Amino acid sequence: MHPHRRSEHFDRAVKKLRKDGRLMDALRKKMDRVLGDPEHTGDYKTARYAGLHAAHVTKNYVLVWELEGDVVIFRDFFHHDEY
């Protein structure tokens, strides 16, 4: 597993959704998968997240992260309709 950090923006986004237990379980599983293999998806192609990595957590929610050396930094978590 890679070491990781979370941005303040990521923490605020997750805090808004903590009441949804199923979503939080799915997020934890996806974060574990990312920490095991942080390059398992391609780069995020939109201008807002250019150069970052992203993956769907559920059908509608996206997790965004970047790599700084060996450290995974979770940057954002959002409903794809909010982008």
Image (cartoon, rainbow, N blue to C red):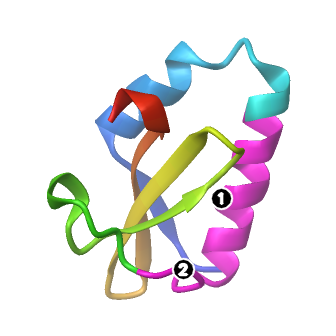
Q: Nearer the viewer, residue 76 or 11?
A: 76
Q: Do the residues under discs 2 and 1 have CB atoms within 8 angstroms?
A: no
Q: Where is residue 21 in the image (x, y as percent from the top left)?
A: 82, 23
Q: What stretch is highlighted in magenta?
A: 24-42
Q: Position of residue 26 (x, y in %)?
A: 78, 44
Marks 2, 1: nearer the viewer: 2
Q: Quadrant of residue 42?
A: bottom left
Secondary element under disc 1, as helix, strand or loop, is helix
Is residue 79 visible in the rendered structure shown here? no
Q: In this view, does 12 lie to the left or right of 40?
A: left
Q: In this view, does 47 lie to the left or right of 66?
A: left
Secondary element under disc 2, as helix, strand or loop, is loop
Q: Residue 41 carries which label?
A: 2
Label 1, residues with CA under 10 Å away: few <14, some 14-19, many ≥20: many
Quick check: is 38 in the magenta stretch?
Answer: yes
- The amino acid type, in three-letter code, at marker 1 is Met
- Where does label 1 land, which residue? 31
- Measured along the vertical axis of the image, is residue 24 above or below residue 76? above
Q: In which quarter of the image is residue 22?
A: top right
- Measured along the vertical axis of the image, is residue 7 above or below residue 33? above
- The amino acid type, in three-letter code, at marker 2 is Thr
Q: Distance between the residues labelled 2 and 1?
A: 13 Å
- Measured along the vertical axis of the image, is residue 30 above or below residue 12? below
Q: Residue at x 58, y 40 (%)?
A: 61
